[in-house]
Structure formats: C-alpha cells, structure tokens
Amino acid sequence: MTNNPLTLAIETSTRRGSVALGVQNGPLGFRELTGKRPHTAEMFPAIQELLRDAGRLAADIGVFCYSSGPGSFTGLRVAATVGRMLQSAVGCEVVAVSTLEVIARNLLSQPDKPERIAAILDARREQVYGALFERSSEGDLTRIDGPAILDPQSWLAGLSPPFWIVGDGIRIHADACRVSGGRVADEACWPPSAREVLTIGVRLHQSGNVCRPEEIVPLYLRPPACEEVYEKRRAEARRRRGE
C-alpha cells in the first residue's frame, strides 16, 4: 500500500446517494446519484466515470470508504457488499464511516463554527437515530454521545445550548427540535455526502482504523422490519403452544 492510495468513497444510506474519488492529499472527483433508479444501477457507471476522468483503473483503488449507517437497510447493505467485493477483487483496505458523522461534518463549513452538533435521522416509531459531536481545537469532530435510537424530545431537551441540529430527522420532529433550544441547520445541510465520507475515511485510514473482512457490515441499530415481523410471529406461535 502506497502512502497516498487512490481512495473511493460511497454514500448510499439515503435514497439519493453519491460517490467520490480522491487521494490522501485531496479529492479527484464527485458524482451525485439521482435516486430515480436503484443505487447499483447508477453507482457503478458513476464510479467508472470518475476512474476514467482520473486516468485510473478499479485495480488502482487502495482504500474503499463507505457510509455504514444508520440509514436505509437496502442502501447500507449495498455499500457493505461493494466493500467486500472490492476487497476480494483488488485487495483494497476498507474503512467504515458513521453516517451521522458524515451529516454532522456538513456544518463545519458554517461561518458560525458550531461547537456541538446533534445529528439526527428519522428512525420511525416517533424515534430518531442520533449522535452528538463536539468540534475539537483542530477543527474536526469528536463523538461524545451515540449513535443510538432515541426519543428526540427528551434527548434534545437534555442537551445544554448552544448546539446545532442537523439531519432529515428535523423534518419529522420539527417541534422537538424547535423547543430544545438548539439551532436548526438549513435543509441544504441535512443530506449525507460522499465528499464527507471521503474526508473522514482518509483520516480514519491514516490512523489505522480499517475493517477486517468480517467487520465490513452495515450499522443496523434496529433489525429490518421483516426480521421484527418474523420474531413477533415466532413469539406468538410459542405463546399459543404454551412454551
């Protein structure tokens, strides 16, 4: 592995994903997916385009970074599968990046320089996936709480202002955000981007945070709905049998 490996980053935790290509000292290209077709239908052509524009091949990829979750079950599964596939095919190293940190980093470019950032994604059932980050003296982020499934009203109310709130959980839980005392970020800052996956992934790789093959998995804080239905039916069947 060279000191400046070609790094591919993908973000598929939401319906509209993106891909980015770069090296340790800077980005080389970025493509946003439309979300009108499945991730794989748009993602692989976008990756090929980025590689072609950079004059590189898939075999040149030394590091693969993916937004690991929480988020869309299908999208997260796609990202982890691509990571395992690339590691097997080209021998690249794989880095898992927290989707909530990806979202929180959108606010680092704000002129007000928020000191603390609560990133939230809707988890349904009147809950959110949430994590709290603090800006370090070096200008980067440190996670100080989460990720976890949370009641947004009680969690946000327990945070001491000043802090910012970012993420699409704001849309569903606007009232809890409004009364919390936190500053709600503009909607343009809510979506995760492969640009930030690339930035975080490069930093994690430099510090040696790479995945073993068995660790290339999505971050599921809650089982998929189909698994929950299955377990509920199993429990009901056991109850009827008197077990």
Image: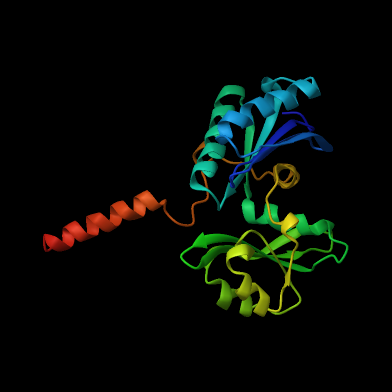
User: Could you say which is closer to the camera, residue 6 or residue 211?
Assistant: 6
Residue 238 shown left or right of residue 219 in the figure:
left
Residue at 55 percent across and 35 percent down: it is 38
Residue 75 shown left or right of residue 106 in the figure:
left
The quadrant where residue 19 appears: top right
User: Could you say which is closer to the camera, residue 64 or residue 173?
Assistant: 173
Q: Where 147 sits versus 181, above or below?
A: above
Residue 27 shown left or right of residue 222 in the figure:
right
User: Could you say which is closer to the camera, residue 51 or residue 2?
Assistant: 51
Residue 22: x, y in percent?
Answer: 78, 34
Q: Where 230 sits versus 24, above or below?
A: below
Residue 63: x, y in percent?
Answer: 68, 33
For this orientation, the residue located farthest to the right is 111
Residue 209: x, y in percent?
Answer: 65, 45
Residue at 69 percent across and 29 percent down: it is 62
Residue 51: x, y in percent?
Answer: 74, 24
Indicate how the structure is coloured in the image: rainbow
